[in-house]
Amino acid sequence: MRKTILTFICAIVVLCLVVLPAQAVELHLEEGIYNEREYQEVIFITGEPVLLTGTVQKGGGRGGRGGRDNTGSLSTSLTYKLQNQDGSITLTRTASYSSTAESKMDNRQTIYVTNLDRLTETITVGSQRYTLTDYLFSKSALVDSQPVVDYFSGTWTGRKIYNVNGNQAQITVETWGDTVGYDHAWGSTETQRIDGTIRFQGEVTIEDRTYPQNWSGTFQVNISFNRTRDLTYHANEPTPISFAGGYIETIQEEGILRYEANLPEFGRDGLVRDTWGRRHVTGSTRLATMPTQRWLPVPSYRDLENHWARGPILELASLESFSTKGDYFGPRLDMSRGEFAYALVKLTDLQGSQAAQEQTQTFNPFDRFRNQETQEVSPFSDVATSHPSYQQIKAISEANIMTGVTPGRFSPDGTLTRAEAITAMIKALGFERLAPLQNPITPYNDDRNIPYWARDAIYVAAEMGIVSGDSFGNVLPNQAMSRAEAAVFLQRFVHYLQHDLKTEYRERLINFR
């Protein structure tokens, strides 16, 4: 489940963190957007926005590969070779970073601090040569790992100083910014905002004559990097075929870069004649990877013909999120707690995430002998280790998404209620702490029927528009969920992860902040 995030732009180096489970963080240090073959970023050092395209090679550590040293610091280096469209402007850069991670809050949160250890950079514009002579950089980010979503936020500041043609002039670029995003099994999004200033002081030579110049400008860059995982139904046209159609899973990554700048007016000779003359410029660019597609298995349920929940049931069944086998799904039957736990773990890859975290634990060569001597004991007296959903029930209880009905009892065959389903969803997202401390009142007419343990979750779900009441304004917290209703509920949860979170973290942040 964890992969991804980042981008930046402009002349300063901005570190990007790919959010993975705690103690498994990898660094993406690129300053722009990219796909499988191409990398792009924008610089403002000439007083004009210049889009550069090229390649970035990643390395670091011994043998040219990134890795951790004996202090646990993760080191990475990047080599850039870029140019503008006609090749008249080129950039070469080598950057080396080191990043440390510190776990806090019972290992639920991780604080990253990144340093820029070494940076060389040369930009050539015709006969002009810009050479980096000094740099400063500081970045820190915090990752909050919730059961099925990792949320992160970071800030940075930086400064670069260039000499032009030796000591003819000096250019100073300063930037500061913030980044926010999330990562989960159904996608990831990171949105960055970068503000910057650029100052030129010195002389410019034109046709053997030297002119003093002193100008400044400002810019703002918004970048988003997005990974999507979508499902589409593909119907088979030849009617005489063993299956009518099925779902296709499509995964794609996309980077979007938008900028605006307030820069001085230059004359035809390239000189700033009027220090008060200004111009506002904007632009954008986008890069996307080639979509990867995969057919999902086709379930063969025979009791869903013309059923109102047929689509959601088949969609989730193609993801193998139901433990039901055979030709009959039983949409009118009650959904059990064990079946719901199984489905939610499968849909969010919760079990895989926890396994990845366990693999990062310190290796002990004697563990394999200890495992042979001891037999696993179930945390619940009514869920044997041989139970078909044992691993999923264990994973969801350890994540505190669904706990036992009483100490030591999970009741896997017990009927699932709407309150239990809503509470599990809000806990999975890590949103339960968003409720007020003092016994929050929900907008539903049957508010008094909400169990005390579900009140915070239902309040948050209502406030965020995740759950709505029926036509009479009731949430029906103690009503049992049928298997069809649970399938629709789980599909809406997946759609929230796919689309609603992206809207909050990308479209709203870029367009309105």
Image (spheres, grey):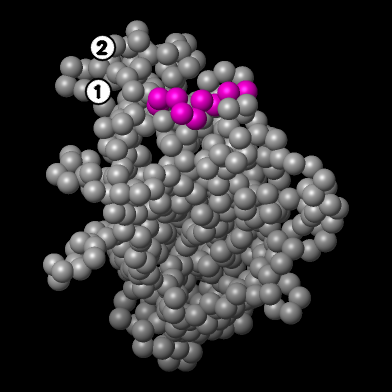
Per the picture, the main secondary structure of the magenta-coloured stretch is loop
Residue 21 is situated, as x and y percent measured from the top left of the image, at 60, 50
The answer to whether residue 86 is above or below residue 387 is below
Image check: 367 left or right of 272?
A: right
Which quarter of the picture shows residue 37? bottom left
Q: Which residues are magenta?
A: 408-416
Per the image, is 410 magenta?
A: yes
Q: Residue at x 56, y 64 (%)?
A: 28
Q: Which amino acid, by three-letter code, is at mark 2?
A: Asn
Total numbered labels: 2
Q: Nearer the viewer, residue 324 or 76?
A: 324
* CB atoms of marks 1 and 2 within 8 Å: yes
Q: Residue at x 35, y 17 (%)?
A: 478
Task: State the residue lying farthest toward the bottom.
Answer: 207
Q: Nearer the viewer, residue 469 or 114?
A: 469
**Number of residues whose C-alpha sits closer than 10 Å to that of mark 2, classed few (under 14), some (14–19) or many (20 or more):** few
Q: Secondary structure at mark 2?
A: loop
Task: State the residue lying farthest toward the top.
Answer: 448
Per the image, is 148 magenta?
A: no
The answer to whether residue 285 is above or below residue 54 is above
Q: Which amino acid, by three-letter code, is at mark 1?
A: Gly
- As drawn, the label of residue 469 is 1
**Residue beneath disc 2:** 445
